[in-house]
Amino acid sequence: MAKPISEQADDLLWSIRGVNFGYNGTPVLRDVNLELRCGCCYGILGPNGSGKTTLLDLMGGLQSPQSGTVEFKNRPLDAWPKKQLARQLALVPQDFMVRFGYSVREVVEMGLHPHLHRFAAPSEQDQALVDEALEITGIAALADRPVTRLSGGEKQRVAVARALAQRPAALLLDEATSNLDIHHSLEILHLIRNRFEQQGMQVVAVMHDLNLASFFCDRLIFLKQGQVVCQGRTEETLTPETIEAVYGVEAEVTVSAFTNSRQVSFRLPVAP
Ligand code: ADP
């Protein structure tokens, strides 16, 4: 099981204070304040368009807040040298796009770059990391295939493999299993959870499926219209009241004897 959350300052990963962000003058995130600490897998949930991807992009340094601050390990993200940050953070985006005909192996090898000296070729040890990432994500058989000729689900597994080869301190996942069938979703989430528990890789995942979030995440952050409406331990936040308030859907939450986690069922019809 995950270590209990600690309130010690040096456990602090992200400190997000008073963040506002919008595109072309339209506000998307409004006064977001969050602290994310070591020792918990975090899930970010909320309806389409609520700002989940934007928040993840800000946490990964792909966007800068228009007001407020985003710090990672007590340093503003834009003050981190790029290569150093790439050794700390890996992002698995929602739409993983690689143009040109790079092979699967070449794309996964790109995860090694933050650790290599300029112009240095990957060592045998580096290659072993790539082999391992290909193996555990179930894409070793596709290693020589051009990524442009993969299915959406296979591409998602390549993106996860590249992120794992990067050996980040923290992994940001944006709906990383949305194109995967249930078997592959569970497999990928299980291996990421193992990395977290056994190697201490911290995880923040944007997720849609409340039931998958329930057994993957220790803490949940619910966004609605760009604001954090609820956050805390999964067992305290995943309630019918939260689901109704965030999604406008009537739900029942029970503890499943089968999974030993909270599972959600929904009632039809939903209000328009
Ligand atoms: P979510 O991940 O919760 O679906 P997003 O963060 O992707 O939400 O988007 C929040 C809002 O910002 C949406 O209304 C979306 O249309 C808008 N948006 C996202 N990216 C862009 C962009 N690059 N340019 C303009 N608007 C954007």
Image (spheres, rainbow, N blue to C red):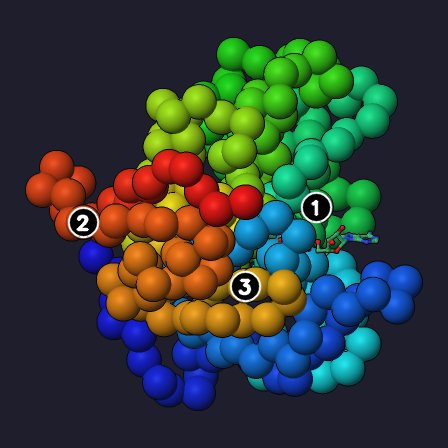
Q: Earlier in the sequence, mark 2 or mark 1?
A: 1
* Front residue (pair 62, 228): 228
The N terminus lies in which quarter of the figure? Answer: bottom left
Q: In this view, does 255 lie to the left or right of 21?
A: left
The C terminus lies in which quarter of the figure? Answer: top right
The residue indicated by pointer 3 is: 223
Q: Does the rendering let one see residue 210? A: yes
- Amino acid type of the residue tagged 3 in the rendering: Leu
Residue farthest to the right? Answer: 24
The residue indicated by pointer 2 is: 254
- Seen at 75% across and 18% down, the residue is 148
Q: Does the rendering let one see residue 189? A: no
Q: Which of marks 2 and 3 is nearer the N terminus?
A: 3
Q: Earlier in the sequence, mark 3 or mark 1?
A: 1
- Seen at 65% across and 15% down, the residue is 150
Residue 113: assigned label: 1
Residue 82 spot, x, y in % from top left: 76, 63
In terms of secondary structure, where does tag 3 sit? strand
In terms of secondary structure, where does tag 2 sit? strand
Judge the density around disc 2: few (<14), some (14-19), many (≥20) Cα neighbours within 10 Å. some
Residue 245 spot, x, y in % from top left: 44, 63
Please tell me whether residue 90 is drawn above or below residue 230 in the rendered image: above
Residue 154 spot, x, y in % from top left: 57, 21
In terms of secondary structure, where does tag 1 sit? helix
Assess mark 3: CB under 8 A from ligand 1?
yes
Judge the density around disc 1: few (<14), some (14-19), many (≥20) Cα neighbours within 10 Å. some
